[in-house]
Amino acid sequence: MGIETVATEADVVVVGGGTAGVIAAIQAARAGASTVLVERSSLLGGTMTAGGVAFPGLFDAWGRQIIAGIGWELVREAVALDGGALPDFTVVPARHWQNQVHINPYLYALLAEEACLAAGVRIAYYEFPTAVRAAVAGWRLETAGPGLRRRVDCRQLVDCTGGAAVVGMLNLPRLREEETQPGSLLYKLGGAPAPGRSQLEALYVHGADSSTAATMTEANLAGRRTLLERVRQQAGKARLLHMQPEVAHRESHRIEGETVITHGDYTSGRVFEDAVCYAFYPVDLHTRTGVKPKPLTPGTVPTIPLRALVPRGSRNLLVAGRCVSSDRLANSGLRVQASCMAMGQAAGAAAALAARSRTTPLEVPLGEIRDLLAGHGAIVPGG
Ligand SMILES: Cc1cc2nc3c(=O)[nH]c(=O)nc-3n(C[C@H](O)[C@H](O)[C@H](O)COP(=O)(O)OP(=O)(O)OC[C@H]3O[C@@H](n4cnc5c(N)ncnc54)[C@H](O)[C@@H]3O)c2cc1C
């Protein structure tokens, strides 16, 4: 049997169906754009589901909700359907993580998929880009998966791969540290969970790098080797009850965008002129010795500008998620899930409007992007 070849057209293609990408695709499709979502794995949610980090934060800051919209809609439904409870956002918690929302990752994956399909998103699981080049109307993207090759002609591309894989394929500038934060493999060895905390434990995988199939293989092998050692140490006392299918990655590449959000911008709560959403989390850099989160000063709520989602010098291309254009310390706070969802919604809105008006995302009047976001439940700075 030969390899099937498929030709597809779309207004918007989102690559990566994780934390940010799901929301970007739903927003683009709900705005009327014909949308394709390319995801290398077999389910949606990325780090939230395959990675097992199922406690999105932070939707609130200093006693009020600052991120809502499509991500919040999915999270709220996942909690309600699972019989869970939402934190009271009017109460400022003693520790930031107390207002993270614990969700059932299996349910989240189901709900995310249902919402994508209901919006008209065409999901392409098991596929990843093999080539991308600029075309007259936008882009020609080639993907491959088992038994299949696809060619997609589209107007706008949104890179939500975590490490800006598509931006890398285009040789646009990306930022990367010499030493990156460790990834983590989440698992459960028999024993009672600590109340109010994730039931899973996490082991650091230093040097974990999501850049290529080879580096991801290496991270998984290292994480599983360490886990097996722990299981052997606990033999007869605790059984291995759960292991996530892959290592979750904290850091790899970030884009160098039209704006780079600095640590100073983040910790001062700079309100960018083209802010499209808020973000909130302590500066949270994990190192070989662990992590000591540095909370923001009371009242500070950082914002994310549209230009931090646009790779420098690009046209018809956006990113959303942990690869947002930012320096390392700013990124350690910006990379969390609620912020990634808010960025995803902003990127999906900008891509849909740009596709509709046959312009680039930065040529779309900002007011139109903000109105579309607000119309879909998002909280927009200054709105
Ligand atoms: C161990 C750990 C603990 C964390 N703790 C918290 C926490 O307590 N609270 C919090 O809010 N955040 C936390 N974070 C941060 C947060 O989970 C991530 O930064 C965020 O989920 C990243 O979202 P993303 O959309 O950028 O990437 P992801 O959610 O990882 O999504 C990327 C998606 O793209 C797909 N993909 C990648 N490459 C390709 C390709 N070439 N082709 C097709 N598909 C591709 C992947 O399969 C994946 O589905 C934690 C992160 C880690 C790793």
Image (cartoon, rainbow, N blue to C red):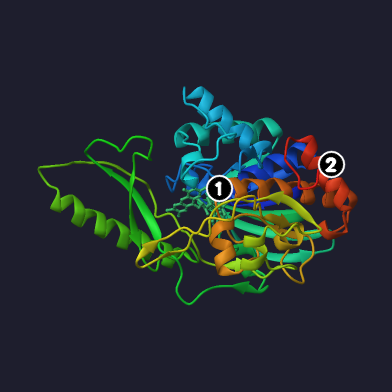
Q: Residue at x 46, y 58 (%)?
A: 293
Pick the residue in front: 21 or 323. Answer: 323
Residue labelled 2 has its Cβ within 8 Å of some atom of ligand 1: no
Pick the residue in front: 182 or 196. Answer: 196
Does residue 35 appear in the picture of this structure? yes
Instruction: Name the amino acid, label 1.
Output: Gln
Dot 1, how many residues are within 10 Å of its Cα: few (below 14), some (14-19), or many (20+)? many
Q: Is residue 32 above or below residue 225?
A: above
Residue, disc 2: 371
Question: How many marks can you see?
Answer: 2
Q: Is residue 197 above or below residue 245?
A: above
For the residue labelled by badge 1, is the local secondary structure a helix, a strand or a loop?
Answer: helix
x and y, in percent, of residue 259 in the image? 73, 67
Residue located farthest toward the front when viewing the structure as drawn: 298
x and y, in percent, of residue 112 in the image? 58, 36
Residue, disc 1: 337
